[in-house]
Image: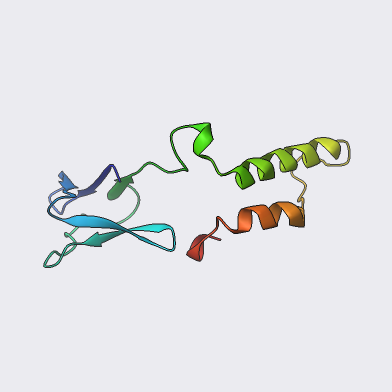
Amino acid sequence: MTSVTYVDTAGTTQTLSASTDYTVKSYNGIGRIQLLDGKTWPSLVGGGAGVVTVVYVAGHGSSATAIPVALKHAILMMCSTLYDYRSTLSPGQQYAVPHTITALIAQYKSGEYQ
């Protein structure tokens, strides 16, 4: 987690502090922001987009070597499949992901984001 900012009721952008306001927890591989004991969520101005901004870094690491081999294989297989069938696919056409590829990536899915 890089930062959590919000627009307060006065219209001023404020930043929550990771050391005094919240912690980041992982449940089944899904990151969650959790307030520290005794803290409450601040009052926000109105609603809608841009009231709360969460900046984070996502992925398996900072280099290609950090990506699990199974995911690399799944990507290569999907590219190969799409290339092999390029003449039969039209733009915007729905295409079922082969079961082998689905099985390779299934172990990296978690929780509600499946």
Q: Is residue 114 visible?
A: yes
For the residue pair 108 and 54, the one nearer the viewer reads as 108
Q: Quadrant of residue 74?
A: top right
Residue lying farthest to the bottom in this orientation: 38
Residue lying farthest to the right in this orientation: 88
Q: Quadrant of residue 33?
A: bottom left
- Image position, residue 9 (x, y; %): 15, 54
- Image position, residue 71 (x, y; %): 61, 45
Residue at image x 13%, y 64%? 39
- Image position, residue 103 (x, y; %): 68, 57
Instruction: Name the colouring of the figure.
Output: rainbow
Q: How many marks?
A: 0
Q: Is residue 46 visible?
A: no
21 relative to 49 in the view: left or right? left
- Image position, residue 104 (x, y; %): 66, 53
For the residue pair 71 and 30, the one nearer the viewer reads as 71
Q: Quadrant of residue 69?
A: top right
26 relative to 68 in the view: left or right? left
Q: Where does the C terminus fall, quadrant-wise?
A: bottom right
44 relative to 73 in the view: left or right? left
Residue at image x 63%, y 47%? 70
Residue at image x 49%, y 65%? 111
Residue at image x 88%, y 36%? 87
For the residue pair 67 and 6, the one nearer the viewer reads as 67
